[in-house]
Amino acid sequence: MKRVVFVTNHYLNSDRKAGFHWLAEAFWRAGWHVLFFTESISWLSYVRGNERCKYPLFRERHRIHYVRERMASYVWLTPFHPINLRLSWLNRLAAPVLNLYSSFSLGEAEAEIARADLFVFDSDHGLLLFDRFKELNSHARFVYRVSDDIRILGHHPLLPEQEDRVVERFDLVSAPSTRFQGRFPSTAQFSVHNHGLEKVLFDRDFATPYATPRPNVVYVGKNHFDADLLARAAQLFPAWTFHVLGAVGPIPAAPNVIAYGERPFAEIVPYVKHADIGLQNLLYTPGAECFADSLKMFQYTYCRLPIVAPSFLKSERKHVHYYEPGDDISIRAAFLAAYAHDRSTISTAGILTWDELASKLAA
Protein backbone atom coordinates (compact mmCIF):
# COMPACT_ATOMS: atom_id res chain seq x y z
CA MET A 1 0.00 0.00 0.00
CA LYS A 2 1.33 3.42 -0.94
CA ARG A 3 1.31 6.13 1.72
CA VAL A 4 0.86 9.89 1.29
CA VAL A 5 1.20 12.67 3.86
CA PHE A 6 -0.55 15.99 3.28
CA VAL A 7 1.14 18.84 5.14
CA THR A 8 -1.30 21.71 5.50
CA ASN A 9 -2.81 24.24 7.89
CA HIS A 10 -6.27 22.76 7.27
CA TYR A 11 -7.94 20.34 9.69
CA LEU A 12 -9.26 17.11 8.18
CA ASN A 13 -12.75 17.24 9.71
CA SER A 14 -13.32 20.93 9.06
CA ASP A 15 -16.73 22.00 7.74
CA ARG A 16 -15.00 24.20 5.17
CA LYS A 17 -13.41 22.09 2.45
CA ALA A 18 -10.26 23.30 0.74
CA GLY A 19 -8.39 21.71 -2.13
CA PHE A 20 -6.26 19.61 0.21
CA HIS A 21 -9.37 17.95 1.66
CA TRP A 22 -10.57 16.91 -1.78
CA LEU A 23 -7.09 15.73 -2.79
CA ALA A 24 -6.87 13.60 0.35
CA GLU A 25 -10.20 11.98 -0.54
CA ALA A 26 -9.02 11.36 -4.11
CA PHE A 27 -5.85 9.62 -2.96
CA TRP A 28 -7.90 7.55 -0.50
CA ARG A 29 -10.24 6.47 -3.31
CA ALA A 30 -7.17 5.44 -5.30
CA GLY A 31 -6.17 3.03 -2.52
CA TRP A 32 -3.53 5.10 -0.74
CA HIS A 33 -3.06 5.33 3.00
CA VAL A 34 -3.58 9.03 3.80
CA LEU A 35 -2.20 11.03 6.74
CA PHE A 36 -3.57 14.58 6.96
CA PHE A 37 -0.94 16.48 8.96
CA THR A 38 -2.32 19.75 10.39
CA GLU A 39 0.33 22.39 11.12
CA SER A 40 0.20 26.13 11.93
CA ILE A 41 -1.79 25.41 15.08
CA SER A 42 -0.40 26.37 18.51
CA TRP A 43 -1.37 27.92 21.81
CA LEU A 44 -1.16 31.24 19.99
CA SER A 45 -4.08 30.05 17.85
CA TYR A 46 -6.26 29.71 20.94
CA VAL A 47 -5.21 33.13 22.23
CA ARG A 48 -5.99 34.73 18.87
CA GLY A 49 -9.33 32.93 18.48
CA ASN A 50 -8.44 30.98 15.35
CA GLU A 51 -11.56 29.46 13.79
CA ARG A 52 -10.04 25.95 13.80
CA CYS A 53 -10.09 25.97 17.59
CA LYS A 54 -13.81 25.13 17.58
CA TYR A 55 -12.76 21.61 16.56
CA PRO A 56 -11.35 18.99 19.01
CA LEU A 57 -7.74 19.85 18.20
CA PHE A 58 -6.59 19.71 21.82
CA ARG A 59 -8.11 16.27 22.35
CA GLU A 60 -6.57 14.92 19.13
CA ARG A 61 -3.17 16.57 19.44
CA HIS A 62 0.00 14.53 18.93
CA ARG A 63 -1.74 11.27 18.09
CA ILE A 64 -2.81 9.66 14.87
CA HIS A 65 -6.59 9.74 14.74
CA TYR A 66 -8.28 7.47 12.20
CA VAL A 67 -11.56 8.75 10.79
CA ARG A 68 -11.88 5.54 8.76
CA GLU A 69 -9.64 2.83 7.41
CA ARG A 70 -6.58 4.34 5.64
CA MET A 71 -7.65 7.94 6.40
CA ALA A 72 -5.94 9.50 9.40
CA SER A 73 -5.54 12.94 10.92
CA TYR A 74 -2.63 14.26 12.96
CA VAL A 75 -2.82 17.61 14.77
CA TRP A 76 0.66 19.01 15.34
CA LEU A 77 -0.17 21.37 18.21
CA THR A 78 3.00 23.27 19.10
CA PRO A 79 3.83 25.84 21.83
CA PHE A 80 3.97 28.52 19.13
CA HIS A 81 4.08 28.90 15.37
CA PRO A 82 5.47 31.74 13.24
CA ILE A 83 3.20 34.77 13.04
CA ASN A 84 3.78 38.14 11.43
CA LEU A 85 4.48 40.68 14.19
CA ARG A 86 3.80 43.51 11.70
CA LEU A 87 6.94 45.48 12.55
CA SER A 88 10.10 44.58 10.64
CA TRP A 89 12.36 44.97 13.68
CA LEU A 90 10.09 42.72 15.77
CA ASN A 91 10.06 40.10 13.03
CA ARG A 92 13.87 40.17 12.90
CA LEU A 93 14.10 39.94 16.69
CA ALA A 94 11.73 36.98 16.82
CA ALA A 95 13.27 35.06 13.92
CA PRO A 96 15.82 33.02 15.97
CA VAL A 97 13.05 31.81 18.26
CA LEU A 98 10.58 31.12 15.46
CA ASN A 99 13.24 29.10 13.66
CA LEU A 100 12.85 26.55 16.45
CA TYR A 101 9.36 25.75 15.16
CA SER A 102 10.51 22.86 13.00
CA SER A 103 12.32 21.18 15.90
CA PHE A 104 9.24 20.41 18.00
CA SER A 105 8.43 16.73 18.51
CA LEU A 106 6.49 15.05 15.73
CA GLY A 107 5.18 12.41 18.12
CA GLU A 108 3.30 9.50 16.57
CA ALA A 109 3.54 11.07 13.12
CA GLU A 110 7.29 10.53 12.90
CA ALA A 111 6.99 6.83 12.04
CA GLU A 112 4.44 7.59 9.31
CA ILE A 113 6.67 10.30 7.89
CA ALA A 114 9.61 7.91 7.77
CA ARG A 115 7.73 5.37 5.64
CA ALA A 116 5.69 7.64 3.37
CA ASP A 117 5.98 7.35 -0.40
CA LEU A 118 4.77 10.87 -1.13
CA PHE A 119 4.56 14.22 0.68
CA VAL A 120 2.27 16.98 -0.57
CA PHE A 121 3.08 20.34 1.03
CA ASP A 122 0.67 23.25 1.14
CA SER A 123 1.85 26.85 0.79
CA ASP A 124 2.02 27.41 4.52
CA HIS A 125 4.23 26.95 7.59
CA GLY A 126 4.62 23.27 6.84
CA LEU A 127 7.34 24.30 4.37
CA LEU A 128 9.51 24.93 7.42
CA LEU A 129 9.41 21.16 8.02
CA PHE A 130 10.86 20.34 4.59
CA ASP A 131 14.40 19.63 5.81
CA ARG A 132 13.14 17.68 8.83
CA PHE A 133 11.03 15.42 6.63
CA LYS A 134 13.91 14.98 4.16
CA GLU A 135 16.12 13.80 7.01
CA LEU A 136 13.49 11.30 8.13
CA ASN A 137 12.67 10.11 4.62
CA SER A 138 14.98 10.92 1.72
CA HIS A 139 13.43 8.38 -0.64
CA ALA A 140 9.88 9.74 -0.83
CA ARG A 141 8.63 12.03 -3.58
CA PHE A 142 8.14 15.65 -2.46
CA VAL A 143 5.42 17.74 -4.12
CA TYR A 144 4.69 21.40 -3.47
CA ARG A 145 1.03 22.14 -4.25
CA VAL A 146 0.92 25.95 -4.36
CA SER A 147 -2.57 26.68 -3.05
CA ASP A 148 -1.84 30.38 -2.55
CA ASP A 149 0.83 32.96 -3.22
CA ILE A 150 2.67 33.12 0.11
CA ARG A 151 3.67 36.72 -0.54
CA ILE A 152 0.13 38.06 -0.41
CA LEU A 153 -0.98 36.26 2.75
CA GLY A 154 0.89 38.39 5.28
CA HIS A 155 3.06 35.64 6.77
CA HIS A 156 6.22 36.17 8.81
CA PRO A 157 9.16 36.80 6.43
CA LEU A 158 10.61 33.41 7.41
CA LEU A 159 8.06 31.67 5.25
CA PRO A 160 8.71 33.27 1.83
CA GLU A 161 12.44 32.96 2.58
CA GLN A 162 11.96 29.24 3.23
CA GLU A 163 9.95 28.82 0.05
CA ASP A 164 12.78 30.41 -1.96
CA ARG A 165 15.30 28.15 -0.25
CA VAL A 166 13.60 24.78 -0.78
CA VAL A 167 11.45 25.14 -3.90
CA GLU A 168 14.12 23.78 -6.27
CA ARG A 169 14.43 20.64 -4.13
CA PHE A 170 10.85 19.54 -4.73
CA ASP A 171 10.25 16.81 -7.30
CA LEU A 172 7.20 18.72 -8.52
CA VAL A 173 5.86 22.24 -8.01
CA SER A 174 2.17 22.18 -8.92
CA ALA A 175 0.37 25.51 -9.24
CA PRO A 176 -3.35 26.09 -9.95
CA SER A 177 -2.85 29.04 -12.30
CA THR A 178 -0.59 30.22 -15.09
CA ARG A 179 -0.23 33.42 -13.04
CA PHE A 180 2.38 31.59 -10.95
CA GLN A 181 4.65 31.11 -13.94
CA GLY A 182 7.75 33.20 -13.45
CA ARG A 183 7.38 33.09 -9.67
CA PHE A 184 9.66 30.07 -9.35
CA PRO A 185 13.16 29.31 -10.65
CA SER A 186 13.34 27.77 -14.09
CA THR A 187 15.14 24.83 -12.52
CA ALA A 188 12.09 23.93 -10.43
CA GLN A 189 9.93 21.08 -11.76
CA PHE A 190 6.98 23.41 -12.36
CA SER A 191 3.59 22.45 -13.82
CA VAL A 192 0.22 24.19 -14.00
CA HIS A 193 -2.57 21.98 -12.68
CA ASN A 194 -5.86 23.82 -12.27
CA HIS A 195 -8.02 23.06 -9.26
CA GLY A 196 -10.13 19.93 -9.39
CA LEU A 197 -13.82 19.57 -8.73
CA GLU A 198 -15.97 17.04 -6.89
CA LYS A 199 -18.15 16.59 -9.95
CA VAL A 200 -20.17 13.73 -8.45
CA LEU A 201 -21.44 16.12 -5.79
CA PHE A 202 -22.21 18.91 -8.24
CA ASP A 203 -23.98 16.51 -10.61
CA ARG A 204 -26.61 15.55 -8.01
CA ASP A 205 -30.13 16.89 -8.19
CA PHE A 206 -30.82 19.45 -5.48
CA ALA A 207 -33.99 21.35 -4.71
CA THR A 208 -33.50 25.09 -4.91
CA PRO A 209 -32.71 26.69 -1.55
CA TYR A 210 -33.97 30.07 -2.77
CA ALA A 211 -37.35 31.26 -1.57
CA THR A 212 -38.03 33.58 -4.50
CA PRO A 213 -37.40 33.37 -8.26
CA ARG A 214 -35.91 36.88 -8.29
CA PRO A 215 -32.32 37.09 -9.57
CA ASN A 216 -30.14 35.34 -6.99
CA VAL A 217 -26.45 36.26 -6.79
CA VAL A 218 -24.21 33.96 -4.74
CA TYR A 219 -20.80 34.49 -3.17
CA VAL A 220 -18.88 31.57 -1.67
CA GLY A 221 -15.57 32.11 0.09
CA LYS A 222 -13.76 33.81 2.88
CA ASN A 223 -10.67 35.89 2.20
CA HIS A 224 -10.21 39.33 0.58
CA PHE A 225 -13.98 39.96 0.50
CA ASP A 226 -14.91 43.38 -0.90
CA ALA A 227 -17.89 44.51 1.19
CA ASP A 228 -18.06 47.84 -0.62
CA LEU A 229 -18.89 46.12 -3.91
CA LEU A 230 -21.69 44.20 -2.23
CA ALA A 231 -23.11 47.37 -0.67
CA ARG A 232 -23.11 49.14 -4.05
CA ALA A 233 -24.62 46.19 -5.91
CA ALA A 234 -27.37 45.70 -3.32
CA GLN A 235 -28.33 49.36 -3.67
CA LEU A 236 -28.14 49.33 -7.47
CA PHE A 237 -30.33 46.21 -7.70
CA PRO A 238 -32.87 46.35 -4.85
CA ALA A 239 -35.04 43.65 -6.51
CA TRP A 240 -32.17 41.16 -6.57
CA THR A 241 -31.05 38.99 -3.64
CA PHE A 242 -27.38 38.61 -2.72
CA HIS A 243 -26.41 35.46 -0.80
CA VAL A 244 -23.09 35.31 1.06
CA LEU A 245 -21.81 31.91 2.23
CA GLY A 246 -18.62 32.01 4.26
CA ALA A 247 -17.01 33.73 7.23
CA VAL A 248 -16.28 36.98 5.42
CA GLY A 249 -16.60 39.40 8.34
CA PRO A 250 -19.01 42.37 8.44
CA ILE A 251 -21.34 42.68 5.48
CA PRO A 252 -23.67 45.53 4.46
CA ALA A 253 -26.98 45.71 6.30
CA ALA A 254 -29.46 45.64 3.43
CA PRO A 255 -32.84 43.90 3.09
CA ASN A 256 -31.71 42.07 -0.04
CA VAL A 257 -28.42 40.74 1.43
CA ILE A 258 -28.50 37.40 3.28
CA ALA A 259 -25.44 36.11 5.19
CA TYR A 260 -25.31 32.40 6.00
CA GLY A 261 -21.91 32.21 7.66
CA GLU A 262 -19.73 29.15 7.24
CA ARG A 263 -21.61 26.03 6.17
CA PRO A 264 -20.61 22.44 5.39
CA PHE A 265 -19.66 22.27 1.74
CA ALA A 266 -22.47 19.88 0.79
CA GLU A 267 -24.97 22.50 1.96
CA ILE A 268 -23.35 25.17 -0.20
CA VAL A 269 -23.58 23.30 -3.52
CA PRO A 270 -27.35 23.84 -4.04
CA TYR A 271 -26.87 27.60 -3.59
CA VAL A 272 -24.30 27.59 -6.38
CA LYS A 273 -26.23 25.28 -8.70
CA HIS A 274 -29.46 27.30 -8.49
CA ALA A 275 -27.98 30.80 -8.54
CA ASP A 276 -28.24 33.18 -11.48
CA ILE A 277 -24.82 34.81 -11.06
CA GLY A 278 -21.60 33.85 -9.26
CA LEU A 279 -19.80 36.66 -7.45
CA GLN A 280 -16.03 36.99 -7.09
CA ASN A 281 -15.82 40.40 -5.40
CA LEU A 282 -12.28 40.49 -4.09
CA LEU A 283 -10.17 43.33 -2.76
CA TYR A 284 -6.94 43.93 -4.60
CA THR A 285 -3.65 42.98 -2.98
CA PRO A 286 -0.36 42.53 -4.85
CA GLY A 287 -0.46 39.13 -6.54
CA ALA A 288 -4.26 38.78 -6.31
CA GLU A 289 -4.39 38.21 -10.07
CA CYS A 290 -3.91 34.49 -9.38
CA PHE A 291 -7.49 34.35 -8.04
CA ALA A 292 -8.68 34.46 -11.65
CA ASP A 293 -8.16 30.68 -11.44
CA SER A 294 -9.42 30.11 -7.90
CA LEU A 295 -11.39 27.01 -7.00
CA LYS A 296 -14.51 29.16 -6.75
CA MET A 297 -14.19 30.19 -10.40
CA PHE A 298 -14.18 26.55 -11.50
CA GLN A 299 -17.15 25.72 -9.28
CA TYR A 300 -19.15 28.59 -10.76
CA THR A 301 -18.09 27.65 -14.28
CA TYR A 302 -19.01 23.98 -13.86
CA CYS A 303 -22.50 25.11 -12.82
CA ARG A 304 -22.55 27.37 -15.90
CA LEU A 305 -22.92 30.55 -13.88
CA PRO A 306 -22.06 33.91 -15.42
CA ILE A 307 -19.52 35.53 -13.10
CA VAL A 308 -19.03 39.11 -11.93
CA ALA A 309 -15.44 39.95 -10.94
CA PRO A 310 -13.11 42.97 -10.61
CA SER A 311 -11.08 43.96 -13.65
CA PHE A 312 -7.77 42.83 -12.14
CA LEU A 313 -9.01 39.22 -12.51
CA LYS A 314 -9.36 39.43 -16.29
CA SER A 315 -8.92 36.18 -18.16
CA GLU A 316 -10.00 34.61 -21.45
CA ARG A 317 -13.27 33.31 -19.96
CA LYS A 318 -16.14 34.83 -21.95
CA HIS A 319 -18.71 34.33 -19.17
CA VAL A 320 -16.88 36.59 -16.69
CA HIS A 321 -18.04 40.21 -16.66
CA TYR A 322 -15.79 42.80 -15.08
CA TYR A 323 -16.21 45.99 -13.08
CA GLU A 324 -13.91 48.67 -11.78
CA PRO A 325 -13.99 48.74 -7.97
CA GLY A 326 -15.84 51.78 -6.64
CA ASP A 327 -17.38 52.64 -10.03
CA ASP A 328 -21.17 52.26 -9.97
CA ILE A 329 -21.51 52.58 -13.75
CA SER A 330 -19.20 49.64 -14.45
CA ILE A 331 -20.70 47.64 -11.57
CA ARG A 332 -24.21 48.05 -12.99
CA ALA A 333 -23.02 47.13 -16.49
CA ALA A 334 -21.21 44.00 -15.27
CA PHE A 335 -24.25 42.65 -13.40
CA LEU A 336 -26.65 43.38 -16.24
CA ALA A 337 -24.32 41.70 -18.75
CA ALA A 338 -23.96 38.68 -16.49
CA TYR A 339 -27.71 38.35 -16.03
CA ALA A 340 -28.25 38.54 -19.79
CA HIS A 341 -25.49 36.01 -20.56
CA ASP A 342 -26.60 32.87 -22.38
CA ARG A 343 -25.62 30.15 -19.91
CA SER A 344 -25.83 27.43 -22.56
CA THR A 345 -22.69 28.87 -24.16
CA ILE A 346 -20.57 28.39 -21.03
CA SER A 347 -18.13 25.53 -21.57
CA THR A 348 -17.13 23.14 -18.79
CA ALA A 349 -14.49 21.42 -20.93
CA GLY A 350 -11.11 20.92 -19.34
CA ILE A 351 -12.26 21.09 -15.71
CA LEU A 352 -10.47 18.32 -13.83
CA THR A 353 -11.88 16.05 -11.18
CA TRP A 354 -9.85 15.81 -7.98
CA ASP A 355 -9.05 12.21 -8.93
CA GLU A 356 -7.50 13.41 -12.18
CA LEU A 357 -5.46 16.02 -10.33
CA ALA A 358 -4.35 13.46 -7.74
CA SER A 359 -3.07 11.19 -10.50
CA LYS A 360 -0.94 14.05 -11.84
CA LEU A 361 0.60 14.68 -8.40
CA ALA A 362 1.24 10.97 -7.87
CA ALA A 363 2.75 10.34 -11.31
Image: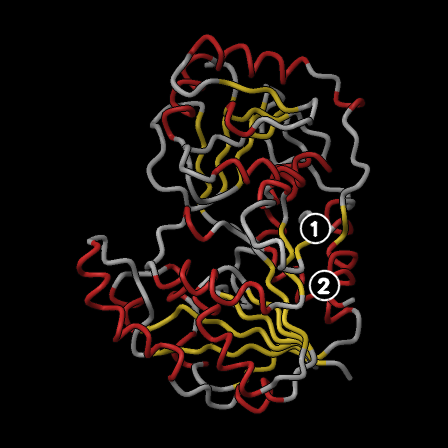
Seen from the viewer's position, the closer of residues 143 and 265 is: 143
Q: Which mark is residue 361?
A: 2
The kind of residue tagged 2 is Leu
* Quarter assignment of residue 55: bottom left
Q: Is residue 43 above or below residue 218?
A: below
Tell me which label, 1 or 2, sits earlier in the chain: 1
**Could you tell me how far apart the alpha carbons at marks 1 and 2 are, in whole angstroms?**
9 Å
Q: Which mark is residue 193?
A: 1
* Quarter assignment of residue 31: bottom right
Contact flag, marks 1 and 2 (Cβ < 8 Å)? yes
Q: Which element type, helix, strand or loop, lies under badge 1?
A: loop
x 67%, y 80%: residue? 140
Seen from the viewer's position, the closer of residues 305 and 268 is: 305
Q: How many marks?
A: 2
As drawn, the residue found furthest toward the top would be 329
x 32%, y 59%: residue? 156
